[in-house]
């Protein structure tokens, strides 16, 4: 009789443990999402995957966010080891740069899962925007044949013999300027004015010596077409 009672208690204990451990477990592997820059009038949305690593059905009960997003999500129960999704949508009527916090509530816990969504909406005019300027040295003399790279737009070109350049770029882009004998410079497009100054890689005295500074400073030569193509291939990667 005593053994029977012991076995009964052990059985009840194991049953209770199994019941308590039978629950859904909501898992969101990524907590930071970025929507690639879109233009006014285009669709701005991202998908937030959510999976159930528990052994009971998972149900998404509510999704909330700051600002003015709208949401759609998997309404039916997500079975054990199954997957669901929350769809974040943002209105694109006006240009904006913002970060939004999203709270996902499920039947797995009273504490919501929180993720961050970053997005940029640009004006339509920026789609074909062109940035112009002149590259100069520390004496404000034009630097010819400077390589200008926009890795965001995968654009590569050279300034002309007078240092003038015009390249496709948006306000959120960064341009890279390269020229022989000068330090490479990365500049945010929104900070570029009429001229852009490059600094020499080394002071003239350090390069030539105080008594050997040439009367005529070496002028950069046009970059060969094959070199420009090589840079373009690297940018596209």
Image: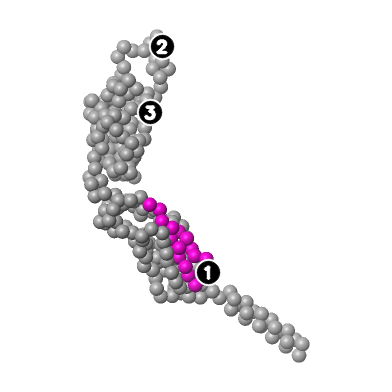
In terms of secondary structure, what is the magenta stretch mainly? strand
Q: Which residue is mark 1?
A: 109
The local secondary structure at tag 1 comes to strand
Q: Which colour style is shown?
A: one colour
Depth check, front residue: 186 or 42:
42
The local secondary structure at tag 3 comes to loop
Identify the residue at horizontal 27%, vertical 24% (top origin): 142
Separation of marks 2 and 3 at Cα, in angstroms: 21 Å
Task: Please check the rendered image and state whether residue 102 is part of the magenta-colored stretch, yes or no.
Answer: yes
Say whether disc 2 or disc 1 marks the residue closer to the N-terminus. Answer: 1
Numbered mark located on residue 178 in the image:
none
Pointer 1: residues within 10 angstroms few (<14), some, or many (20+)? few
Q: Is residue 35 above or below residue 194?
A: below
Identify the residue at horizontal 38%, vertical 68% (top origin): 73
Residue 207 location (% of width, % of height): 40, 18
Q: Which residue is mark 3?
A: 183
Residue extending furthest toward the top: 211
Depth check, front residue: 108 or 152:
108
Q: Which residue is mark 2?
A: 210
The local secondary structure at tag 2 comes to loop
Magenta span of residues? 98-115
């Amino acid at each position: 009789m005593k053994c029977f009672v012991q076995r009964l208690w052990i059985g009840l204990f194991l049953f209770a443990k199994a019941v308590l451990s039978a629950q859904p477990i909501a898992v969101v592997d990524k907590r930071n999402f970025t929507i690639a820059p879109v233009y006014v009038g285009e669709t701005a949305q991202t998908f937030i995957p959510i999976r159930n690593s528990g052994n009971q059905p998972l149900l998404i009960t509510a999704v909330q966010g700051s600002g003015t997003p709208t949401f759609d999500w998997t309404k039916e129960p997500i079975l054990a080891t199954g997957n669901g999704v929350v769809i974040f949508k943002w209105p694109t009527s006006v240009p904006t740069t913002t970060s939004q916090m999203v709270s996902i509530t499920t039947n797995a816990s009273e504490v919501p899962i929180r993720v961050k969504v970053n997005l940029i909406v640009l004006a339509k005019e920026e789609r074909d925007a062109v940035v112009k300027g002149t590259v100069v040295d520390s004496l404000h003399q034009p630097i010819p044949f400077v390589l200008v790279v926009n890795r965001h737009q995968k654009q590569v070109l050279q300034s002309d013999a007078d240092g003038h350049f015009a390249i496709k770029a948006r306000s959120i882009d960064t341009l890279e300027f390269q020229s022989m004998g000068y330090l490479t410079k990365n500049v945010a497009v929104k900070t570029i004015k009429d001229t852009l100054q490059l600094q020499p890689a080394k002071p003239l005295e350090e390069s030539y010596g105080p008594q050997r500074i040439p009367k005529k400073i070496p002028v950069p030569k046009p970059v060969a077409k094959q070199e420009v193509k090589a840079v373009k291939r690297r940018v596209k990667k």
